[in-house]
Image (cartoon, rainbow, N blue to C red):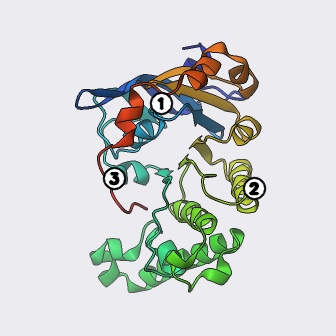
Amino acid sequence: MNERADSGNVNGKEPILAVAGVHKRFGGIHAVRGAHFSVAEGSITALIGPNGAGKTTLFNVITGFYPPDAGMISYQGRSIYGKAPHRIAQRGMIRTFQITKALRAMPVIDNMLLAGSRQPGEHLHSLLTQPRASRRREAEVRERALELLASFDLDKKLDDYAGTLSGGQRKLLELARALMAEPRMVLLDEPMAGINPTLGRRLLEHMQKLREEDGVTFLFVEHDMDVVMNQSDEVIVMANGETLIQDKPEVVRADPRVIDAYLGGGGVAEKAEASPPAESEEHA
């Protein structure tokens, strides 16, 4: 592991996420082996590696969907090791999935409203004792949903069922839903997979805009090397469940360990990621 992975300091900013010595096993398969890296606040960081390298498993561990077996995970300077997914989301870290999780039998607008933070219905007492404040918050949530749908060019689809959207539109909807929770950090699992180039460019433009205007941090898994090299501040490389290097894209591109990892394949972790435990279906 090179020294830049310990710094997590891009453009002088301190890490928002730090991962050290994280392990995850599935029976006899060691899927993640001491992963170690950090992500600077306000950065766009790519996590790459050959198939089976342990990337999605590590995402699931960081965001609470799989319990870690060992290590340290901190977010904004506080431990999130072993925390439940909804607790991590409440702290401002949201993830999307390689296979979109939109509620297909619900209209687009309802998908958005369901993902809104600080919903009045979450607290029955406040709903009953402060009806005016509850109605005001409902209006705020709806207004934010409409603004986000408009910014993602989905406002004309708000009454359509999510299941009728194209794959690319569902990717945009999932990112828009994630933003309903007003996150400080978003983890994207293969955001470019299965979408056409036009929608892909639009998604990347939104990432850059959210980083520049709102300071949102992004960590994303991606196989498209053009996207990785052109969109990332730093790149983390995994192979066989281990982190090999973290550095700027041009440094990573030329590193012989990275070249060898891609030519040599994913190794034992590939078996673990081929049939991991079933994930939960829906998370805001």
Q: Left or right: where does residue 255 sit relative to residue 37?
A: right
In the rendered image, residue 238, in percent from the top left (x then y), is placed at: 52, 26
Tell me what residue is drawn at x 64 percent, y 73 percent: 149
**Mark 1, mark 3: which one is toward the viewer?**
1
Q: Left or right: where does residue 22 sit relative to residue 40?
A: left
Q: Residues within 10 Å of mark 1 (few under 14, many from 20)?
A: many
Mark 2: amino acid: Arg
In the rendered image, residue 1, in percent from the top left (x then y), is placed at: 54, 14
Where disc 1 sits, the SS reads: loop
Q: Nearer the viewer, residue 183 or 219?
A: 219
Q: Residues within 10 Å of mark 3 (few under 14, many from 20)?
A: few
Q: Nearer the viewer, residue 42 or 221?
A: 221
The tag earlier along the polypeptide, 1 or 3, is 1
CB under 8 Å between callouts 1 and 3? no
Q: Is residue 87 above or below residue 170?
A: above
In the rendered image, residue 126, in percent from the top left (x then y), is placed at: 33, 76
Mark 1: amino acid: Ala
The tag earlier along the polypeptide, 2 or 1, is 1
Tell me what residue is drawn at x 60 percent, y 44 percent: 218
**Mark 2, mark 1: which one is toward the viewer?**
1
Tell me what residue is drawn at x 62 percent, y 68 percent: 169
Residue carrying label 3: 279
Numbered label attached to residue 259: none
Q: Residues within 10 Å of mark 2 (few under 14, many from 20)?
A: some
Q: Is residue 1 above or below residue 155?
A: above
Where disc 2 sits, the SS reads: helix
Mark 3: amino acid: Glu
CA gap, disc 3 and disc 2:
28 Å
Residue carrying label 2: 201
Residue carrying label 1: 53
The tag earlier along the polypeptide, 3 or 2, is 2
Which of the 4 image quadrants contains residue 71?
A: top left
